[in-house]
Amino acid sequence: MKIKLTPGSLALAVAAFGATPLACALTPARIAAGPTTYVWLSGSSSTQNSVFRSVISLCNGLAGNAGANDVHMYMEGTTPEPGKYLGDRGAYACTMSAAAGATLSGKKVVVYHTVEGGSFNTYAPHLSMAGEPNPNGYLPGSIKRVNNLAGQDGAGKCAAGAPNTTNVTLNGVSYAVGRYNNCDVVTKSFTTTLKGDALGLPGQSYPDGGFSDTEYLVNKQNLLITKALSTIGSEVATNIGQAFGAAVSYPLYYQLQKNSITSGDIAASCTAAPFTAASPNLTRACQPDLPAQRYSTVANKDSISGVDGSLFGGAIGSVVTLARRIPTSGTQSVSNMRFLAKPCATGVSGGAMEPAVTADSTTTAIVNQQSGTGGVKIALNNATGAGQFAMGIISMENTPAPTATAERWAFVKLDGVSPNSDTQQRAKAMDGAYTFWYELSAFTAAGAVSPASPAGAALIVATTTMLGNSDLQGIFVTPASSGSGPTSKGARLGNSCQLAIQ
């Protein structure tokens, strides 16, 4: 299904429903009153905000849909919007519109969304329940979601009283969305005899599926998983691309600017007063370059032992931090592919390199491992505060919003090409100049062990459609997609190890 948004329908939505959430909003009391449908999505943290926006674009009163806007979100912390800073878990509740399809249309739906542990947690709970032997310990065995929403208002599991309001922009139009903060979370554990909890309900006890930055086969190779995808469900190649970028702390950004001045790529004024290593010039004209081979040197297990700040022109013996993700992360998977050729160059010809892990740290090269994108941002910010070099990979749906104490990091060029030369942070990826992008996979659980509910399966299809029809930062569709969103020149055709072709 393609959803075409017209200026008239958007204007009507803003005038009628965009100003404030209505009194009929899906508060905990209304959720408890039922009937309520529950869906649980898990997986990619790099698309947390894009998935959130796509889900609520299916709701009444938003994105040109008819009906009253009753959307509320339930946040683990106080982040204004999922994916904008901290929090690996949230929930979104609304009455679904016709855009969500016949299975969901007109229903009050709570969508739990967990990005803890990253993309592989799209599949991991179902593999645990299917008896994957997991000799290497990559299946976490449990993940968390926001606690049951019913009855939380004033019960201490979310902030008591009336909700806050966040204005969320969808395809250029701002809508008011109610927001409850500081919601409690609950742990669900998965074994061959336990589907999350004793109830074993899809969408509540265990996830229905979700999104992964790379396809199952890449995860299967990286994590030495034995079971075939068909054992736990199925996935579709969305043909939706997302760009990633190398993000660095301010002191490294400033040093890379010095390097780019020396090479004649940016003006000498880019590092002139009042700019410093603690507060560099972040204008696009002064964006410095990071050669990919230097990132590879830090990220590679066999070369990190010789790394210190002098690799980038800093002082000999100074510290470099690699803020990487845990092995189950899709962002870590794409980092491994781009900088270490793993797992794509495995086999008799060799070529793939092993990623550096925490145990490979030295006194001058520290590997800091994080479970979510927010953790990488914090590590980069902390390095800025300590006056140290740090680097990590973050998806381009993210834009830092620096303050005196937070979000002090920035994207750099990679081999001379900027990932964010445009405000939507995708133009160079779409035209083929910037090659650090991959295509999402959408997984739906199926089979006798842990099948998705009909509502869960329907929501994954509808969300995938909306992802392809929306204007989202860092996200685009490829020519292989039927989506109406911004379209790239190249496609990987669902194979992350394949170079993009036109």
Image (cartoon, rainbow, N blue to C red):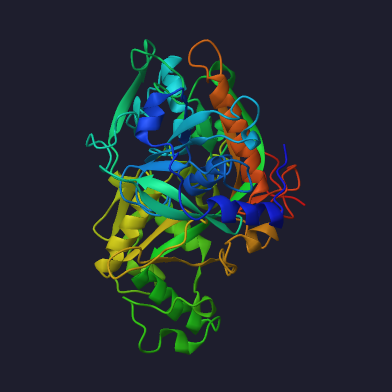
Which residue occupies 48% across, 16% down?
450
**Depth check: 252 or 285 in front?**
285
Q: Is residue 81 left or right of residue 186?
A: right
User: Does residue 164 appear left or right of residue 69 in this picture?
Assistant: left
Which image quadrant is residue 145 in?
A: top left
Q: Residue at x 48, y 48 (%)?
A: 49
Percent coordinates x, y for residue 171 in the rendering: 61, 55
Where residue 231 appears, x then y in whole percent? 55, 16
Q: How many numbered marks appear?
A: 0
Image quadrant in which the N terminus is located: top right
Q: Is residue 245 left or right of residue 439?
A: left
Across and down, in percent, residue 233 comes to 57, 21
Q: Nearer the viewer, residue 43 or 290?
A: 43
Q: Can residue 318 be seen from the camera position used here?
A: no
- In x, y percent, where is residue 301? 39, 48
* In the depicted structure, whether residue 466 falls above or below residue 32: below
Task: Locate residue 63 relative to residue 381 in the image: left or right.
Answer: right
Q: Is residue 181 above or below residue 37?
A: below
**Residue at horizontal 55%, vertical 24%?**
455
The answer to whether residue 80 is visible is yes
Image height of 37 relative to 297, above or below? above
